[in-house]
Amino acid sequence: MASTDFLDVLVVTFNCGRKPIRPETFARHLSNATTGPDIIVLSLQEIAPIAYSFLGGSYLAPYLSQFHHAVHQAGKAFGEAKYVNVVTRNAGLTACMVFVNEEHKSKIRWVQAAGVGVGLQGMGNKGAVGVRLGYAATEDTLELAFVAAHLAPMEDALERRNEDWMNIVRGLVFTPVDKKGSSSTTTLQGATEDSEPLLSNAPGSASDHPRGIYTPTSHLILAGDLNYRTSPTTPQPSDHLAFPKPITSSTDPQHYSHLLRNDQLARELAAGRTCQGLREAPIHFPPTYKYSSKAQTHAETDDMTAEWVWAKHRWPSWCDRILFLDLPRWMKEETPGAEIKVVWYTALPLMPTSDHRPVALSLRVPLQAIPAPEDSEGGQDVRLRPPFGTDPRWRERRAAARRKEVVVGLLAYLFWTWEGNGVLLALILGILGGWAIVRSQLDV
């Protein structure tokens, strides 16, 4: 557990491959990686097939409930710790689930949520969903914003990924979540039955007003399949021979550190073209994507330190990342010694249901609110001067995209799922039967 001066936060990002996880496997990897955090945040991409993700609600609940089970099982391994699902939100195929240790449940003062699609026609096949919490820290409120994101794929889509980030900053606007779990905007799909939005927002508080990703008094943690690659082109037929291997010596050309030098995200961060202001802990783990179907099949039985079996048609890359916004300068000057401490940053073992490895970050966040800066203190801090302004039509655009998602979800359900095929067949038979009855009556 955290000390009285820090809040222990565990953030995990995982591309689920549109398949349900095995809770016992996920729980075991969580419990092996950490010891009882105060808050657990799951950033999930490709959470379920597109039909269930776009329709949401009860269609999506069976997939999300597996993560509830996994967190509850992991809690038992933390010494019988119990976790409450504060809020679960999804925007299309991307979801964010926030769990709080039951001992701290009463410290959640308010909850905000946000969602935006950056896929086709603004739909949520790619996009982001966010949750911002107000956490009681002595007399003040500590603000924590968590953003789950999924950007454009493919080696040659670097500029599109940067554009996706711009559209996320412009369109991800946080609005209050009430006691019933609904947001003041209709752009988000509902929470599952197990989620427990806690205290209502205090009238007149900062949580009453829509706010973007960058806020002067809020922490920000971004986690997701950001899809930045290690090459601008797909591999040539023989390139797979040079893919990284589990070698301990960093001087060996097939040690993963040599490929990491080509990481697009590190380059774009340094140039200020994406994820502006955010930082990442040093990477000391192999690429998280793309593992072959053979690797997935043997994920539970093979020792991954013996062999990494990559898919030959994609460059191994660190697609799955977690970044965070450091404390602002004015807080460091006001509170010398205050810092966000990275406890560890690692990739969890490969799961048998995905070609991505989950990535986890353990942070210790000072248990004190970020103060609002004086006029002369802010300078060029990204919290005060975001790289992109909020889209004035964000609500309208998301509502229009949501209507398209429902249509696409219904069509996908009818044509791409067994249940939908049954409904469609029954509908066709009903129409044909009705027409036959009408014909027989007309022939009399």
Image: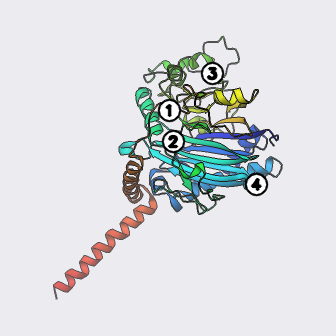
Q: Tell me which label, 3 or 2, sits earlier in the chain.
A: 2
Name the residue furthest left: 443
**What residue sits 55% from the left and 50% below the top?**
113
CB within 8 Å, label 1 to label 4 = no
Q: The C terminus is located in which quarter?
A: bottom left
- Which of the two discs, 1 and 4, sits closer to the camera? 1
Q: How is the image coloured?
A: rainbow
Q: The N terminus is located in which quarter?
A: top right
Distance from label 3 to label 2 (Cα)?
42 Å
The amino acid marked with disc number 2 is Gly
- Which of the two discs, 2 and 4, sits closer to the camera? 2
- Identify the mark at residue 102; answer none if there is no mark: 4
**What residue sits 50% from the left and 56% below the top?**
189
Name the residue carrying label 3: 245
The amino acid marked with disc number 3 is Lys
- Identify the mark at residue 212; answer none if there is no mark: 2
Q: Position of residue 272 (x, y in %)?
A: 50, 23
